Image (cartoon, rainbow, N blue to C red):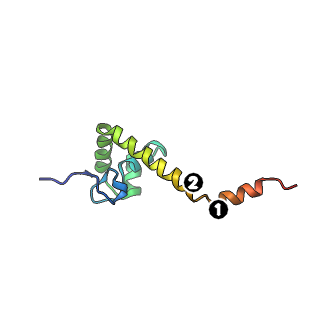
Amino acid sequence: MSKPKIVKTTGICSGDARLNAHRIKVRDILYWLDVHKHSKEQVAKGLDITVEEIDVALEYYRTHKANIEAEERRADRVVAETEKRHPSKLQQKLEQLRTPTT
């Protein structure tokens, strides 16, 4: 029996779908391919995985698109909540500098 190539583990990568034996999420691979427009070979080299593992992640995405998109929305909510609770001190300072003093 072969090991699953894509796994979800509570406590690892927020339980998101990832490559087995890696902490590389399916949506991380999609990000590098879609947003940065890197080739599969570039992504594989940069993440130290194989092109075959990228193909497995892409197939998983095609068959579980709604789940991956839900993971992305959840991650966006977590980031927004964190930023709200812990505003960036740098952003606050930049706003102060941009605001003209009278």
| Quadrant housing residue 61 | top left
Q: Which residue is mark 1?
A: 89
Question: Which residue lies at the image location 18% right of the left edge and 54% below the top edge?
Answer: 3
Q: Give the label on residue 1, or none.
A: none
Question: Which residue lies at the image location 62% right of the left edge and 59% below the top edge?
Answer: 88
Q: Position of residue 48 (x, y in %)?
A: 36, 59
Q: Is residue 27 above or below residue 85?
A: above
Question: Which residue lies at the image location 71% right of the left edge and 57% below the top edge?
Answer: 94
Q: Position of residue 65 (x, y in %)?
A: 34, 38
Q: As drawn, is 93 to the left or to the right of 67?
A: right
Q: Secondary structure at mark 1?
A: helix
Residue type, label 1: Lys
* Furthest residue in direction right, as rendered: 102
Is residue 39 visible in this depiction of the protein?
no
Residue type, label 2: Lys
Q: Are marks 1 and 2 in contact (CB under 8 Å)?
A: no
Question: Which residue lies at the image location 32% right of the left edge and 50% below the top edge?
Answer: 17
Q: Earlier in the sequence, mark 1 or mark 2?
A: 2
Q: Nearer the viewer, mark 1 or mark 2?
A: 2
In 3D space, how far apart are the residues under numbered discs 1 and 2 (Cα atoms)?
12 Å
| Quadrant of the rendering where the C terminus is positioned | bottom right
Q: Which residue is mark 2?
A: 84
Q: Is residue 23 above or below residue 55?
A: below
Q: Secondary structure at mark 2?
A: helix
Is residue 31 visible in this depiction of the protein?
yes
Of 61 and 85, nearer the camera is 85
Within 10 Å of the Cα at label 1, are there few (<14), some (14-19), or many (20+) other Cα atoms? few
* Furthest residue in direction front, as rendered: 85
Q: Position of residue 21 (x, y in %)?
A: 27, 60
Q: As drawn, is 70 to the left or to the right of 7?
A: right
Q: Position of residue 38 (x, y in %)?
A: 45, 46
Q: As drawn, is 95 to the left or to the right of 12?
A: right
